[in-house]
Image (cartoon, rainbow, N blue to C red):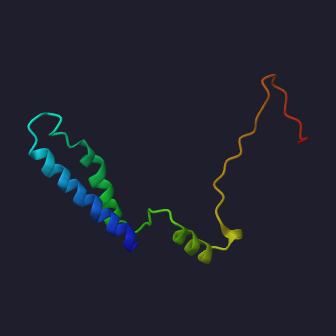
């Protein structure tokens, strides 16, 4: 969680630097600060959320420790395939 907050703070600092650089530009292209619209909200979210956003092996180890493999949530969807002739598929695999 500490690593996530540090990365979020770095994103906010990068946003501030981008705004400062864009404010000193002389042409329209140099004054473009579109990246701030994406980087600043992400940085703020990473700082203030209680949800862990980063995917690391550490997170997987913590999850495995608290949830044994038989209690994992399965979020897969099985969509049956039906042939184009309208017949039901056979149960043979």
- Which residue in the rendered view is the most extreme toward the top? 85
Residue that appears at 25% across and 59% down: 12
Q: Is residue 54 left or right of residue 85?
A: left
Q: Is residue 79 left or right of residue 88?
A: left
Q: Quadrant of residue 83?
A: top right
Q: Which x, y percent locates residue 50?
A: 39, 69
Q: Quadrant of residue 86?
A: top right
Q: Is residue 88 left or right of residue 37?
A: right
Q: Quadrant of residue 46?
A: bottom left
**25 is higher (above) or lower (below) than 56:** above
Residue that appears at 89% across and 36% down: 90
Asked whether the viewer can see residue 30, the reply is yes
Q: Which x, y percent locates residue 33?
A: 20, 43
Which of these two is toward me, 93 or 15? 15
Residue that appears at 38% across and 70% down: 3
**76 is higher (above) or lower (below) than 60:** above
Q: Which x, y percent locates residue 34?
A: 24, 42
**84 is higher (above) or lower (below) than 2:** above
Q: Which x, y percent locates residue 60?
A: 57, 69
Q: Quadrant of the C terminus?
A: top right
Residue that appears at 44% across and 66% down: 52
- Which residue in the rendered view is the most extreme toward the bottom? 65
- Which residue in the rendered view is the most extreme toward the right? 92
Asked whether the viewer can see residue 48, the reply is no
Q: Quadrant of the N terminus?
A: bottom left
Q: Is residue 65 left or right of residue 31?
A: right
């Amino acid at each position: 969680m500490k690593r996530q907050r540090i990365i979020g703070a770095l994103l906010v600092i990068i946003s501030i630097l981008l705004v400062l650089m864009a404010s000193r530009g002389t042409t329209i292209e140099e004054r473009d600060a579109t990246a701030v619209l994406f980087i600043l909200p992400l940085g703020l979210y990473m700082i203030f959320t209680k949800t862990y956003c980063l995917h690391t092996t550490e997170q997987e180890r913590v999850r495995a420790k608290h949830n044994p493999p038989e209690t994992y949530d399965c979020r897969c969807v099985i969509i049956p395939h039906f042939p184009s002739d309208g017949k039901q598929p056979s149960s043979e695999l």
